[in-house]
Image (cartoon, rainbow, N blue to C red):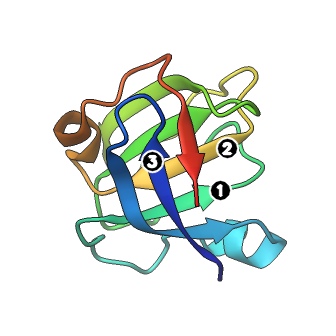
């Protein structure tokens, strides 16, 4: 799986230093299932994606919905296991992060992200 860094374009802050790209049927299907936790700095970028679920998951995650031009459209902080997100119109990507990472990084709707 490809590993990226996700950076807040405006502040330059690294949101995820080890972000795995899930862009195939299998990697998107598996997602974070079977994991008990995410490490600090870790993330999962799902492409394409406009909604997620935490059915069968064992951990809480932060969820960031991103447009095709890398703008943050919607954020769900600390999404608990067994939940369904709404479908976010115009979302092309979803970034899943450890709980509290959105708050720690100051990420807000409207911010733009970049990857490298």
Q: Is residue 68 left or right of residue 60?
A: right
Q: Identify residue for label 2.
A: 93
Numbered circle sitting on residue 108: none
Mark 1, other Cα within 10 Å: few <14 / some 14–19 / many ≥20? many
Q: Identify residue for label 1.
A: 46
Q: Nearer the viewer, residue 73 or 8?
A: 8
Q: Nearer the viewer, residue 81 or 43?
A: 43
Question: Which one is closest to the eye, mark 1 or mark 3?
Answer: 3
What residue is drawn where x is 47% and y is 23%?
A: 111
Q: Are marks 2 and 1 in contact (CB under 8 Å)?
A: yes
Mark 3 or mark 2, earlier in chain? 3
SS type, badge 2: strand
Q: Is residue 58 left or right of residue 71?
A: left
Question: Which one is closest to the eye, mark 3 or mark 2?
Answer: 3
SS type, badge 1: strand
Q: Identify residue for label 3.
A: 7
What residue is drawn where x is 64% and y is 68%?
A: 21
Mark 1 or mark 3, earlier in chain? 3
Q: Is residue 7 left or right of residue 1?
A: left
């Amino acid at each position: 799986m490809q590993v990226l860094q996700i950076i807040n374009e405006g502040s330059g802050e690294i949101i995820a230093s080890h972000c795995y790209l899930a862009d195939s049927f299998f990697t998107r299907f598996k997602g974070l299932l079977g994991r008990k936790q995410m490490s600090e700095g870790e993330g999962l970028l799902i492409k394409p994606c406009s909604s997620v679920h935490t059915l069968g998951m064992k951990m809480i995650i932060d969820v960031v919905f991103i447009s095709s031009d890398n703008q943050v459209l919607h954020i769900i902080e600390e999404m608990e296991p067994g939940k369904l997100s709404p479908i976010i119109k115009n979302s092309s990507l979803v970034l899943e992060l450890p709980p509290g990472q959105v708050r720690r990084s100051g990420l807000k709707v409207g911010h733009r992200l970049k990857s490298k």
